[in-house]
Image (cartoon, rainbow, N blue to C red):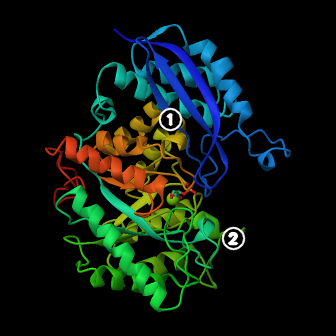
Amino acid sequence: MGYRITALCAMEILDSRGRPTVDVRVEVDGGVSGHAGVPSGASRGTREAVERRDGDAARYDGEGVHGVVATVEDEIATAVVGPVWDSLHELDAALCALDGTPTKERLGGNAVVGVSMAAARAFARSDGQELYRWLPQVAHPARLPVPHFNVVNGGLHAENRLDFQEFMIAPLGAPTFAEALRAGAEIYQRLKRRLQQLGFSTNLGDEGGFAPALQAPTDVLDLLVGAITAAGYETGPNGVMIALDPAASEFCQPDGSYRVNGTILDSAGLVDYLTVLVDHYPIWSIEDGLAEDDREGWELLTDRLGARIQLVGDDNLVTNPDSISEAIAHRRGTAALIKVNQVGTVTEALEAVRRCHQGEFGAMVSHRSGETTDTFIADLAVAAGCGQIKAGAPARGERVAKYNRLLTIEAQAPELPYGLVPRRRDGTDVS
Ligand code: 2PG
Ligand code: MG
């Protein structure tokens, strides 16, 4: 058995922000092929896999990826086309070895991840299986994830004065994924109407959420609670909850303080502020509540809120299995965000999920702010069984593509459970 790659091609395409990115196609024996569109972040962790760009100011302001396309078709193709690969794991290990750097900076993380994702698709197809069934089980059995709809955008994703980047709604209590999607879409429309009534713009940010000219996080939270109720849903664990991604690295000042809503806070002050928000609003999860290098702040936040809500590490963990193990050991956060392009290969992202499981950490699969219509993360979230995904608002084609793929998976596999991984009373996972 195994998989023999017969052709590898790449081309420059556009992402959802109108910037170039890479599309990769892997063909295997029998003429079966798999595609991948590579996503791209705006608020990035400093230790992410390096995204290579041409830097030729004459094309796309230097953002072109012709160099990456050439690397895929020349150096990577020379190494991976021809031999029989036993598994995706073996191919990904060869890609990492070929690159030879911890952050894929030589070949480019955007080259490597495209090949890894496209190969996973091609290998699954050549075995005649859907991707979510083919990907190896590394932690929990497959399940349909709770969608986290980013309905109000701020930070680097919008042109408003909101310091917090993402305000999400999560239908934790929905009976099925389809009902969760319906709840998200209905609440989104209520929110739009309310913003219109209040005279705010309903223009959209990068992830499809509204980007009203607001500044105070509490103003947005009030609007979200109002929209959830107006749409006929309850707030709470049996209904709809709120999740935040402040992306605090982006409003952390050079001296380590934070500027939120016009006020300067030190790290303990920000922890107090987040605690007040959790006391007053139905918030179940906060991602990047502190900056990536504020380790003491992360420990304080985890002491304070770790038993009450989920605390997700993104910029500080960058889907890196060793960084995740270190955070678990030091009680920095209670979950990790999983982004394949942040670490560079599908195998490493799955290893990151496995480390989370091993250390009783939660895991949430995530899109990037720059996306394509690629739906890989929908299958990944189901296969990883982590019970959580964030893929933006229930609007804009590149976001909705992921949610529609999850609808298709649910229709194909109605036996799969929906929702968060059940936890025991002591907080450990049941499965
Ligand atoms: C994040 C991501 C996705 P970006 O911070 O979690 O929402 O943003 O892709 O810009 O890094
Ligand atoms: Mg984030």
Element carrying mark 1? strand
* Residue under the point 37% across and 62% down: 148
| Neighbour tally class for label 2: few under 14, some 14-19, many 20 plus, Cα within 10 Å | some
Residue 25 percent location from the top left of the image: 53, 27
Residue 67's place in the image compared with 189, above or below, is above
Q: How many labels sit on residues?
A: 2
**Nearest to N terminus: mark 2 or mark 1:** 1
Q: Cβ of disc 1 within 8 Å of ligand 1? A: no
In front: mark 2 or mark 1? 1
User: Which image quadrant shows ligand 1?
Assistant: bottom right
Residue 400 percent location from the top left of the image: 41, 56
Q: Tell me the amino acid under the disc marked 2.
A: Gln
Residue 371's place in the image compared with 114, above or below, is below
- Specify whether residue 398 is in view: yes
Q: Tell me the amino acid under the disc marked 1.
A: Ala
Left or right: where 96 falls relative to 428: right
| Neighbour tally class for label 1: few under 14, some 14-19, many 20 plus, Cα within 10 Å | many
Q: What residue sits right under mark 2 in the picture?
A: 253
- Specify whether residue 276 is in view: no
Give the numbered dot on residue 36.
Answer: 1
